[in-house]
């Protein structure tokens, strides 16, 4: 080896492994092809580093007759003995392959994983670097349970496909990284639109949506009095009370504006259902922030406004510096509502229809004109008292 069969596997990879849309399918088909070439594989693992705010990398593990196992590794793994004492860390550090024959009378068991694999009947272990074009090192490991381990020809066959595998892995990793970064910084829906080609200035769409705008109370004073790192930690914990809830209720977080957050619940057909989701998310966020205030941040308060209307959603900006956001009268209206969340008191009979649409308390203010108000501005510190007042007035 490499013989004609191995060269055919390499050519399949060079052509982009087009029959395998997903990375786990690439590994499954690759291993099946290598086994068909006479390489007696038992367990194969590929470790790919990634660019993600919470995930250091991903691991793909193949075994014959089983689905490829996919796991994500957090950054904390880098500090553990499991990683630091692994062959993966050694290959990352040196870019040199590691081979250990485990069927010999006195095998070298200098990594903990080797003893575990030997106990499972593994006779040969080979870890090799996958080198991307930017020089970053990733790793693939190969094992067999053949009594005498891999032959030299079989190792040569594996080595022959490593560079083509690295090219395919890099292309797929870059594609995933692009999606991850867009999802992280502009949101899932906006990211998909950008990747689909909606990238020109003025490329916008008019959509009907429930709009969420929230703001921390007293943030300016906090910013002036807190050390920067403490302030950032406060903001992150504050947003953790809202963002997962918003996403879980099917909305899109569009923007963080200092201590402010803008999100939309796009409405396709059922306006009532979207409004219920928005209000449920608001209630949960309110409860989360109240819990945070009582446990760790006394005095933490926030205002939240919800409104419904048509918005322009898409690329806005100058030249090649664009922002994917939403604008329009409905957005202006929700901003004015949010400014008054600490002052609004429910008092108008027209809200009876809106109460039927959205179970829960809904405010209207004479100072907001001409908004079509179908939603609930909330101030977390006044909520309980005003809920009781509203119930007493309206039965």
Image (cartoon, helix red, strand yellow):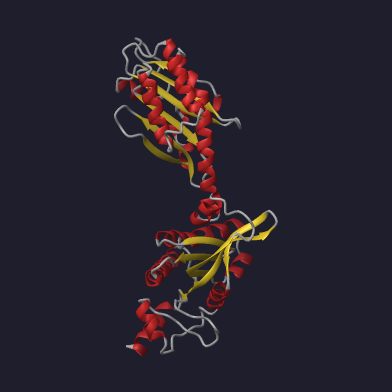
* Residue 99 in sight in this render: no
Residue, far right:
319
Relative side of 69 to 266, left or right: left
Q: Is residue 277 above or below residue 192?
A: below
Q: Nearer the viewer, residue 113 or 133?
A: 133
| Quadrant of the snapshot with the N terminus | top left
Residue 263: tell me if it is visible: yes
The x and y percentages for residue 311 are: 54, 69
Give the residue displayed 51% in from the left and 47% down from the top. 180
Q: Nearer the viewer, residue 90 or 110?
A: 90
In which quadrant will I find the C terminus?
A: bottom left
Q: Residue at x 32, y 15 (%)?
A: 146
Which quarter of the figure has residue 293? Answer: bottom left
26 relative to 280, above or below? above
Please state if 15 lies on the left or on the right of 390 as rendered. Answer: right
* Residue 68 position (above or below residue 304): above
Q: Nearer the viewer, residue 71 or 321?
A: 321
């Amino acid at each position: 080896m490499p013989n004609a069969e191995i060269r055919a596997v390499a050519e399949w990879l060079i052509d982009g492994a087009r029959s395998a849309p997903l990375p786990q399918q690439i590994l499954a088909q690759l291993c099946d092809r290598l086994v068909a070439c006479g390489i007696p594989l038992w367990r194969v693992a590929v470790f790919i580093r990634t660019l993600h705010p919470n995930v250091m990398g991903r691991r793909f593990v193949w075994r014959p007759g089983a689905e490829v196992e996919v796991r994500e590794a957090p950054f904390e793994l880098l500090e553990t003995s499991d990683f630091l004492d692994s062959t993966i860390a050694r290959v990352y550090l040196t870019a040199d392959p590691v081979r250990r024959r485990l069927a010999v009378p006195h095998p070298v068991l200098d990594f903990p994983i080797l003893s575990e694999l030997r106990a499972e009947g593994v006779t040969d272990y080979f870890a090799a670097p996958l080198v991307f074009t930017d020089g970053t090192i990733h790793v693939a490991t190969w094992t067999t349970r053949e009594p005498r381990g891999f032959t030299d020809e079989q190792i040569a066959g594996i080595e022959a496909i490593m560079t083509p595998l690295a090219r395919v892995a890099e292309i797929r990793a870059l594609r995933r990284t692009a999606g991850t970064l867009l999802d992280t910084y502009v949101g899932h829906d906006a990211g998909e639109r950008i990747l689909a080609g909606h990238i020109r200035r003025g490329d916008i769409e008019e959509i009907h949506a429930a709009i969420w705008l929230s703001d921390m109370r007293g943030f300016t004073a906090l910013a002036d009095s807190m050390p920067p790192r403490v302030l950032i930690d406060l903001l992150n914990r504050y947003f953790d009370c809202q963002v997962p809830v918003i996403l879980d209720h099917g909305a899109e977080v569009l923007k963080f504006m200092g201590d402010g957050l803008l999100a939309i619940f796009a409405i396709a057909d059922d306006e009532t259902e979207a409004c219920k989701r928005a209000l449920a998310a608001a209630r949960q966020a309110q409860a989360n922030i109240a819990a945070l205030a009582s446990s760790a941040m006394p005095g933490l308060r926030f205002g939240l406004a919800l409104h419904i209307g048509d918005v322009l959603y898409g690329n806005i900006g100058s030249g090649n510096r664009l922002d994917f956001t939403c604008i329009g009268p409905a957005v202006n209206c929700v901003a004015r509502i949010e400014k008054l969340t600490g002052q609004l008191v429910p008092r108008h009979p027209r809200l009876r229809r809106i109460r039927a649409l959205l179970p829960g308390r809904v405010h209207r203010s004479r100072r907001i004109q001409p908004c079509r108000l179908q939603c609930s501005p909330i101030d977390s510190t006044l909520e309980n008292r005003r809920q009781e007042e509203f119930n007493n007035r309206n039965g």
